[in-house]
Amino acid sequence: MAQPFPYTYYACDCFDSTTTTASKRASQVLAAAAEEDERDFDPRSPRSNYSLFPLEHLLYCEDCQQIRCPRCVIEETLNWYCPSCLFEVPSSVVKSDGNRCTRNCFNCPVCTAPMTTNSLDTSGDNGPPYILACPYCHWSTVEIGIEFEKSTGISSQLARVANGGKHIPTQKERDKERERKKELEERRREGRAVMSPSEESPTTDTEREEVAPSHDELFANLGAFYKSQMEAQTPSNPFSSHDINYSSPSAYSRIVNLYSSTTSKKNKRNKHTPFREAGSALEGLTIHDSAADAAAIERIKREGWGSTLSPSTKHAQINPNLRFDNELRPLATLLCTKRSKRCRSCRHILSKPETKVTSTRYKIKLLALNHIPRLSIRALPLNINPAQQQPLAPPARPESAFNYNGLKSGIPTHFLLHLSNPLFDPIRVTLATPSTTPGKVQSRITILCPQFDVGANTDVWDDALASTLSPINRTSLINDAGQIEAGKIWDRGRNWTSVVVEVVPGFLKPVAFPVLAEDGKGGGEAEGDDGGLDEDEDVLEIPVFVRIEFEADVVAEERGLGVSVGGGDAKKGEGGAREKREVAFWTVVGAGRIAPL
Amino acid sequence: MSRPTARKAAPKGEYIETDSGNKVSRRSAITGTANITLGGRTVIMADVVLRGDLHSTRPVPSSSGKEVTPTSISIGRCTVISTGSVIKPPCRTSKGMPHYYPVKIGDNVFVGPNCAISAITIASHVHIGANVTIHPFAIIKENVKILPNSVIPANMVIAPGSVVGGQPARVVGEVGEGWGVSGGGAGGGLGVGGGGEEKWVEGGDLRELVRSIK
Ligand SMILES: [Zn+2]
Ligand SMILES: [Zn+2]
Ligand SMILES: [Zn+2]
Ligand SMILES: [Zn+2]
């Protein structure tokens, strides 16, 4: 678990809600909630990984009156930017140059740290030559034999130089070269037929072909080949005489061809070459070369595994076929995006950031935390174990004293569930939890007061001026046996209420058999191997079902719009009709980790 | 090494509170106090080391002709520097001479315990977990969350709204739209008083946290 204890995740039920229509109204929500009551949410189910989110990651659709998680929103890219130089990249450039920064931003191919341009000049004037160096792992372009003449325009300089310092032809040069080679081949073929071989060209040509074409070259060749293929295909399209675009995607023209072939047989006869695949290196075909494999094996024999790339490093490279460390290239920084989000079912915009890269403000932001209660858990600061009978004076800093990573099996531990209400109407809350946590380590859970009210989120000053809330007499909560009485809340404030949850953490190595695991207490002494425990099986996660009921104005509400900034005003609809609303959802609270005995 | 006030025999609170509400632990180690500015309601906890003495040695031009004390560390409002963290201005050597550059930390920044920070800028509403190392000249923009035990390499720029982690740190995600927004809209609807939860959220307004530190 990445989050420190204690934490709360909220479940979005979008993965199993069959009706995500905008017209889902209270009655349906009720029915769905009732249905949901039937089965408990299992935070350990593999599916739960995809439906649990921290509250601040959730949005809220006011039209659907539902939580919207990253899976049930549609994202629209507003712009692209480089996270390193924070420059926006126009979408046209992204289309032509790809999703990497074309300025001077590079990441280390070994450790991903951003690289810096350093001077190799020893005179202290920071003159040429320059290199790209990683300040973290000290890998630099010196290791692949690349130096730069200027400290600016590194991207274009790097694009022109291969590892070892050799010149890389540009795209234009490559295209020209390809055409030249193709012509040569053609001529040779013809020449062979006419039996008059042209003498000058083959020698130079074979010399050049000694060097295997690079990944980029092959890709360019393949791209050019398919382009020519598509161009060759389109004229055979019977509709081409009309206004079908010459540059339409191949798929489209192929479909059109498919239909057209049935219309007339004349066309079929007219159709010349079918769409063929690449047939030579010039067309982008890579033929497996066993000699290269043998050379690679020889090299590993000679230099050992140290010269090869680790799987994660290999995975990070642009060219997926790299094997050895001298083939690494600095990686241009990947671009990031700013995105707006829409509700997947009703298409309303839920969040829209300002497009400026450095701005952190939002034009629209409908947060779930302004619409559903925030639930949090933490250890009860007091020790009210009957055995110890300690006075009820709250220690100064109880939080720091409690070790969330060392929950003791079999010993009842008390937690406080704290629920705060962001709505401007008071809510009635019903909490539910399975009596034992799902999973192999079964902890017993009891919410001592599962039903209670939470005040409205009125102005803070209301609270300060009129402290109408009577202070809760804690001692009355504790009965003669020293136990917390059930059915009473622990504490409350303006818009929050807290209740006590009693947890009996389960045993990590219980009874080896699930049959006996029913009896959580018996297994303490059992010495079984804990081989049955999966990772994080010792984490005490409590599924809590939250249902809130409240009366709200029927009138369309726009309060969510401004809430995130100033808090919005708590004006109630004057004389407007009220309607009963109900919201229900599952949460998972991570209460801690059970310590081994 | 100079302490803000001389130690006295009488038992006192952990913190010395300044006029602007800064709380500085008596057990912190602050050098070059003249070169450090605290924005107000900022907390410097025990065993924190602030190397204000490492300031720029270049002459600062001033209109009045008077000598201006260079700032080496400036920290904004409601920022919390937790126990054992070290803030040391970044240094660059040129022509054999070390040159220090001032560190600027924004408002509502939380620095977890035992961090080592040599960043050039940390913007506002940044949450830094425990045991984080930030190498010289890193720039951390607004609303960034740095996971515990991360190492931020030198010169790294962290874009606004990123979550970074790892050694070396890389962007592992984005903070949610609700980052820094405490629940309940107005007035932070989080619990007040006994039994309530902590009254602040990561990346949010740290005023309540500062108030609770005594
Ligand atoms: Zn969802
Ligand atoms: Zn860039
Ligand atoms: Zn590196
Ligand atoms: Zn919707």
Image (spheres, grey):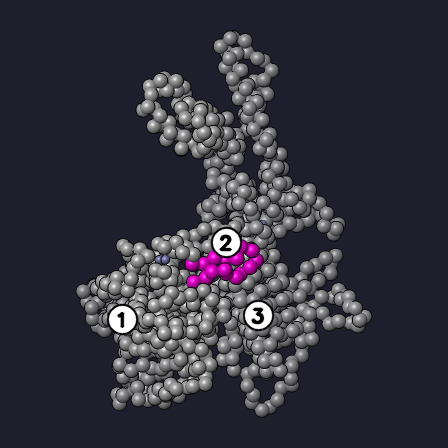
Q: Which residue is mark 3?
A: B107
Quadrant assignment for the N terminus of chain A? bottom left
Query: Which residue is at 66% across, 71% downward?
Result: B52
Q: Residue A353: within the magenta?
A: yes
1 and 3 marks on the same chain = no
Q: In the rendering, at what x and y percent does residue A180 appear?
A: 57, 22
Name which residue type carries label 1: Ala
Residue at mark 3: chain: B
Secondary structure, mark 3, is loop
Q: Which residue is mark 2?
A: A338
Secondary structure, mark 2, is strand
From where the camera sits, is residue B214 visible?
yes
Specify start and end residues of the magenta stretch as a single range.
A350-366
Residue at mark 1: chain: A
- Sequence-first disc among 2 and 1: 2
Lateral position of residue A227 relative to residue A593, left or right: right
- In three-dimensional space, the C-alpha distance between marks 3 and 2, rounded to whole angstroms, equals 24 Å
- In three-dimensional space, the C-alpha distance between marks 2 and 1, rounded to whole angstroms, equals 39 Å
